[in-house]
Image (tube, rainbow, N blue to C red):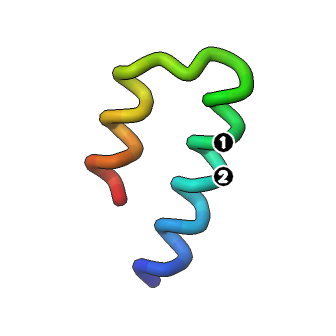
Amino acid sequence: MRRLLLFIADLIFSFRAQHTGTLGEVEAIQRLA
């Protein structure tokens, strides 16, 4: 389950980084992972 969550978070991170990549989103994803 945790591996799946990390995989999804990584997908979201890479997608967001290509478009906006704001620090707040990075922190939110790291908090999720």
| Relative vertical location of residue 19 with respect to residue 11 in this rendering, above or below | above
Q: Residues within 10 Å of mark 2 (few under 14, many from 20)?
A: few
Above or below, 2 against 18 in this view is below
In the displayed structure image, the side of residue 23 where residue 11 appears, left or right = right
Q: Is residue 19 above or below residue 30?
A: above
Which label is found at residue 5? none
> In screen coordinates, is 14 left or right of 22?
right
- The spot of residue 8 in percent (x, y) is 59, 60
Q: Position of residue 2 (x, y in %)?
A: 41, 79
Q: Residue at coordinates 31% horizontally, 34% vertically from top-left?
A: 27
Q: Is residue 13 left or right of residue 1?
A: right
Kindly give the residue lying farthest to the left in the view shown: 31
Q: Secondary structure at mark 1?
A: helix
- Residue labelled with disc 2: 11
Could you say where residue 14 lies in the image, as x and y percent from the top left?
Answer: 66, 42
Residue at image location 52% in from the left, 54% down from the top: 9
| Total numbered circles | 2
Label 1 environment density (alpha carbons within 10 Å; few <14, some 14–19, many ≥20)? few
Q: Amino acid at mark 1?
A: Ser
- Circles 2 and 1 in contact, beta carbons < 8 Å: yes
Position of residue 10 measured from the top left corner of the image (x, y, whole percent): 58, 55
Q: In which quarter of the view is residue 13 placed?
A: top right
> In the visual, does 24 lie left or right of 12?
left
Q: CA distance from mark 2 to mark 1?
A: 5 Å
Q: Name the image quarter holding the C terminus.
A: bottom left
Q: Is disc 2 placed on a helix, strand or loop?
A: helix
Residue wearing tag 1: 14
Q: Residue at x 61, y 44 (%)?
A: 12
Q: Residue at x 43, y 28 (%)?
A: 25
Type of amino acid at the residue the image marks with label 2 = Leu
